[in-house]
């Protein structure tokens, strides 16, 4: 499977998980569940757009950072809520830093695009 298809697959799964977690948060969840759902729903369209239109290596690197950061951040919030402990120390902050870094890489990708 090529990178673009993989990113589109992840975008669909993240979007579906975000909708499911939003429903759970509305009925029986807490702040951590709602935050994870919001992050997923905000990042799914971005990943979809990168998967569909992102042809540069820099943009794909940004997508990878976003996916890893989103996984760490949301998984740690959900583990805290449902299990009562952290995945590992600083998992959520590390995920958040990767998300910030991913967005910065997406921004830098604009500077590396060839002119038309």
Image (cartoon, helix red, strand yellow):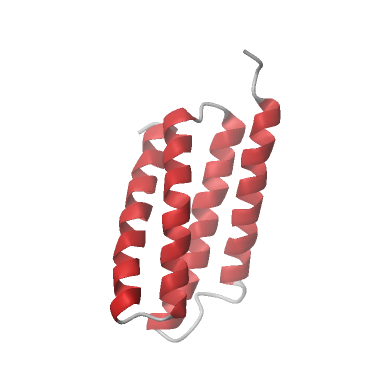
Asked if residue 50 is positioned above or below residue 55 in the image, the reply reads: below
**Residue at horizontal 29 percent and vertical 70 percent from the top:** 23
Question: Is residue 48 rendered to the left or right of residue 104?
Answer: left
Front-most of residues 86 and 28:
28
Question: Is residue 40 rendered to the left or right of residue 92?
Answer: left
Question: Is residue 13 rendered to the left or right of residue 45?
Answer: left
**Residue at horizontal 36 percent and vertical 60 percent from the top:** 18
In the image, residue 55 lies at what x, y percent?
Answer: 51, 26
In this view, which residue lies farthest toward the top? Answer: 116
**Residue at horizontal 62 percent and vertical 47 percent from the top:** 103
In the image, residue 42 lies at what x, y percent?
Answer: 47, 54
**Residue at horizontal 42 percent and vertical 49 percent from the top:** 44
Q: Quadrant of the C terminus?
A: top right
- Give the total number of marks visible in the rendering: 0
In this view, which residue lies farthest toward the front? Answer: 26
Q: Quadrant of the N terminus?
A: top left
**Quadrant of the image occupied by residue 61:** top right
Asked if residue 72 is positioned above or below residue 47 in the image, the reply reads: below
In the image, residue 30 lies at what x, y percent?
Answer: 41, 81
Asked if residue 38 is positioned above or below residue 15 in the image, the reply reads: below
In the image, residue 46 lies at what x, y percent?
Answer: 48, 44
């Amino acid at each position: 499977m090529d990178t673009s298809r993989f990113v589109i697959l992840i975008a669909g799964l993240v979007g579906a998980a975000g909708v499911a977690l939003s429903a759970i948060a509305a009925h029986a969840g807490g702040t951590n569940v709602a935050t994870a759902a919001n992050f997923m729903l905000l990042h799914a369209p971005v990943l979809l757009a990168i998967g569909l239109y992102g042809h540069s290596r820099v943009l794909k690197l940004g997508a990878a950072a976003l996916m890893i950061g989103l996984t760490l951040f949301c998984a740690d919030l959900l583990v805290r809520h449902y299990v009562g402990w952290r995945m590992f120390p600083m998992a959520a902050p590390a995920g958040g830093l990767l998300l910030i870094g991913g967005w910065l890489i997406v921004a830098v990708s604009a500077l590396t695009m060839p002119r038309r």
